[in-house]
Amino acid sequence: MKVYKITPSQVYAAQTRVKADRKLGITTRDARVLLASRGIAGQRVPVEFNGVKYVVDASRTPSVSA
Amino acid sequence: MTQTPAVEAEDVPPDDVELSAWQRFRTGATTVRSWTGARVVAGALLGGAFVVLVDPPIDMNWTELAPVINDLAPIATLTAASLAAWIAWRTLRQRDEADRRSEWWRRAQWAVDKSLSSEANVKEVGEAAMRMLIDSPLADKGEAELLKAFVVDDNDSLPDLPGHLDTDTGETDTGKSKTAERTEES
């Protein structure tokens, strides 16, 4: 399982971008943004994205695995 | 590790749903173009009144019609009063909407100013405010696009996906925003 380490702020930013893109009639294609938007600020959550299993690590602690 | 993501990209509530004419009317979002129909109706009524009063197509016996017109007078008064009240209400709604949009723009300016700060904490507050303002119903498409141009930059700091070559998100996806591409080109 691949770990995608981001910050809580980046989770909010990615979710906002996806929502803003929809508001503008655009489909978000940036894979990083789509994956980050599925995270939860402050937590590590497993996410399956495009058939690949990730752990979106948006915790405030440094990543322990890679 | 058993938690499921709270927010799926596909589950984000659709904010781009077109409002119906009635919803636009209720929320005061009726545009100038929406008044075209009202103008047509008003023109037809005025034209009809002109034909009947000035150049009637048939000989009208006004003596017989007078009592009927007299009976309809209260209804005409009520209609005129209702129309005046409706126009006043519409004016108030539009003024309120304009005031709220003006305040939205002032908040947007404040958020942009803060997001350009060199202090990390101030910058973060400004960016958070911009994200909230984009989702506001007061933001039209152009204004949301303007704010989004600032917020998108925040995503440029996202790390590349581990094993990103395995993911296919579309032929035009570069994994980076237009801003990042322009920065690399320059």
Image (cartoon, helix red, strand yellow):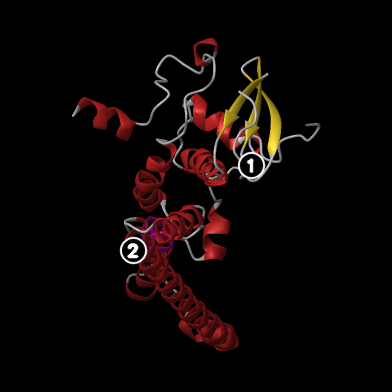
Q: Residue at x 50, y 28 (%)?
A: A32
Q: Is residue B164 left or right of residue B146?
A: right
The magenta segment? B30-39
Could you tell me which residue is drawn at 42 percent across and 20 percent down? B173
The secondary structure type at the circle numbered 1 is: loop
Residue placed most toward the observer, B85 or B129: B129
Q: Residue B149 location, x and y as percent?
A: 35, 44
Give the chain letter at badge 2.
B
Q: CA distance from mark 1 to mark 2?
A: 31 Å
Mark 2 closeness class: few <14, some 14–19, many ≥20 residues within 10 Å? some
In the rendered image, residue B106, in percent from the top left (x then y), is placed at 36, 68
The part of the image, by quadrant, that contains residue A49 is: top right
Query: Where residue A20 appears, x then y in whole percent?
Result: 48, 43
Q: Is residue B172 magenta?
A: no
As shown in the figure, which amino acid type bears the numbered disc 2?
Answer: Gln
Q: Which quadrant holds the C terminus of chain B?
A: top left
Which residue is rendered at x = 51% and y = 82% of the image? B85
Furthest-left residue in view? B186
Label 1 sits on what residue type?
Ser
> Is residue B58 visible to us here?
no
- Say above or below: B163 vs B21: above
Q: Chain of mark 1?
A: A
Q: Which residue is mark 2?
A: B109
Taking depth in this image into account, of A11 and B99 the one nearest to the observer is: A11
In percent of width and height, residue A29 lies at 47, 25
Q: Is residue A36 visible?
A: yes
* Total numbered labels: 2
Quadrant location of the N terminus of chain B?
A: top right
State which mark lies toward you, 1 or 2.
1
Q: List the single residue furthest toward the top.
A: B166
Residue for badge 1: A59
Main secondary-structure element of the magenta-colored stretch? helix
